[in-house]
Amino acid sequence: MLSRLKVKWRTSSRIRTTKSRHLSFDNIMYVSGPNSATALDAHTGRVLWSWKRPLPSDYHSIGFGHVSRGAAVLEISSMLQTLDCYLVSA
């Protein structure tokens, strides 16, 4: 069965500091990075939406770097935490 698997689409990301797995739910793949998220059609790889929050000028990291631990889905909303402690829902 596995020998019949083949690539249908692929995408590239500029996100280098993600420490999460991509999340797939209801035929949508959510890819998150530090203060950013993108939703892809899981069948075609087409970008459905993309979002990025700029860091405030007074943001100071306490040593953890700019990393993302991933997105979450609750019922019909996707959620992402930002580096400056906001919870964003789409």
Image (cartoon, rainbow, N blue to C red):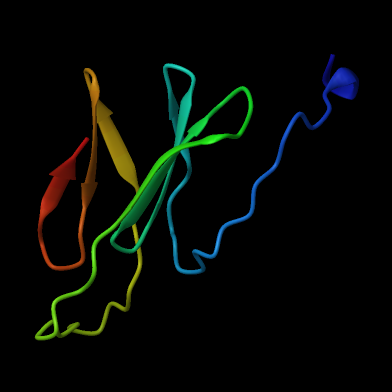
Nearest the camera: 31 or 50?
50
**Relative to 48, residue 2 above or below:** above
Q: Is residue 10 left or right of residue 37?
A: right
Nearest the camera: 44 or 24?
44
Q: Quadrant of the C terminus?
A: top left
Q: Residue at x 24, y 19 (%)?
A: 76
Quarter of the image where one finds residue 2: top right
x, y percent for residue 28: 46, 26
Q: Quadrant of the N terminus?
A: top right
Q: Is residue 75 left or right of residue 7?
A: left
Q: Is residue 89 left or right of residue 71?
A: left
Q: Is residue 19 left or right of residue 57?
A: right
x, y percent for residue 3: 90, 22
Q: Residue furthest right?
A: 3
Q: Residue at x 28, y 61 (%)?
A: 35
x, y percent for residue 39: 43, 37
**How many marks do you count on the picture?**
0
x, y percent for residue 31: 45, 45
Q: Residue at x 17, y 83 (%)?
A: 62
**Relative to 61, residue 85 above or below:** above
Q: Residue at x 24, y 62 (%)?
A: 53
